[in-house]
Image (cartoon, rainbow, N blue to C red):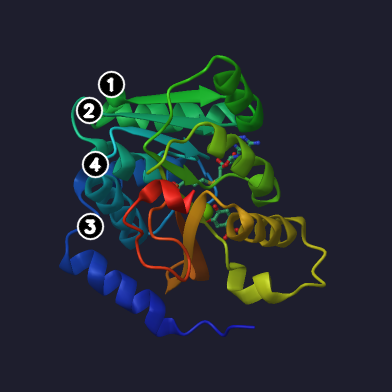
Amino acid sequence: MATHDPTWSKVDHYATELFGLLDPELASVAARSQAADLPAIQVSECQGKFLELLVRLSGARRVLEIGTLGGFSTTFLARGVGQGGTVLSLELDERHASIAREGLIDIGLGARVDIVVGDAHESLRRMIDEGAEPFDLVFLDAEKSGYPRYLDAILKLSRPGTLLVADNVVRDGRVLDSASDDEHVRGVQEFNARVAEAPALDATLLQTVGVKGYDGLLIAIVGGIARRGTTAPANPEAAQ
Ligand code: SAH
Ligand code: DHB
Ligand code: MG
């Protein structure tokens, strides 16, 4: 398994400083979580900025987040969608949700973020039943054992072109341990395998190192035109 090189954190701090990623608004959201003793498992500043850039790059206006915690990643997503865009964030823990809500309102992003409290599996089921509009981008970051089930729901709330980003898919390399009995590792393994098998998804996995140690992001596009091992066909329908 991986050893944690202290350089990883130093480089994260260097880049965060260099690009001014932890501005006063973000710092206030982070401070609120810290003061409330929430687990410090939010995305790093560099990862959060990457999410914001993905939202902007994809032009996403309607974003779904699964797992809010104190609203740190939510802040980046909400910045990415811009004015008129919306982020729906699902959170099981009422206390996490209210800390996130307060922090987002405090920095003026409350109007574009809706935090729904409850088991995200149930919230998603309700949205599917109600025929909710598909999302442009989904950031999956709740309990890892639930990832396979989340995938099914996400696909039902997607359209061709929807971007899926899932956090923590490497887990210090433990994703390779096929004998693992850790439910989080197993969840991620099954999730990755099901993404790989889903004909509608075109995916990659990016390993990450930094203040959060060694982990990775899975990035997939729904109904991607360029299919595995092929170049983009003249007729995108032919790829379905
Ligand atoms: N995305 C956040 C971190 C999320 S941590 C950030 O980067 O800033 C994972 C969160 O998922 C926790 O707040 C936890 O309470 C929540 N969670 C766990 N199980 C859940 C479930 N079944 N439904 C919704 N949220 C859940
Ligand atoms: C941990 C990290 C995460 O990014 C997360 O979403 C959940 C847990 C962790 O390091 O335990
Ligand atoms: Mg995470």
Is residue 41 in view?
Answer: no
Q: Quadrant of residue 233?
A: bottom left
Q: Which residue in the protein does label 2 denote?
A: 108
Q: CA distance from mark 3 to mark 1?
A: 23 Å
Q: Which residue in the protein does label 3 denote?
A: 21
Give the farthest residue toward the top.
130
Q: Which residue in the protein does label 1 denote?
A: 111
**In the visual, does 69 lie left or right of 11?**
right
* Mark 3–mark 4 CB contact (< 8 Å): no
Q: What is the crowding at mark 4: few (fewer than 14 residues within 10 Å), some, or many (at least 20)?
A: some
Closer to the eye: label 3 or 4: 4
Mark 1: which amino acid?
Answer: Ala
Give me the residue at 50% from left, 40% from top.
69
Q: Position of residue 6 (x, y in %)?
A: 43, 83
Q: Position of residue 117 (x, y in %)?
A: 55, 24
User: In the picture shown, does residue 145 fall above or below 70?
Assistant: below
Q: How many marks?
A: 4
Closer to the eye: label 4 or 2: 4
Dividing the image into four equal quarters, which quarter contains ligand 1? top right
Q: Is mark 3 within 8 Å of ligand 1?
A: no
Q: CA distance from mark 2 to mark 3?
A: 18 Å
Give the numbered dot on residue 59.
Answer: 4
Q: Quadrant of residue 63?
A: top left
Say which element carries label 2: loop
* Mark 3–mark 1 CB contact (< 8 Å): no
Closer to the eye: label 1 or 2: 1
Q: What is the crowding at mark 2: few (fewer than 14 residues within 10 Å), some, or many (at least 20)?
A: few
Q: CA distance from mark 4 to mark 1?
A: 19 Å
Q: CA distance from mark 3 to mark 4?
A: 21 Å
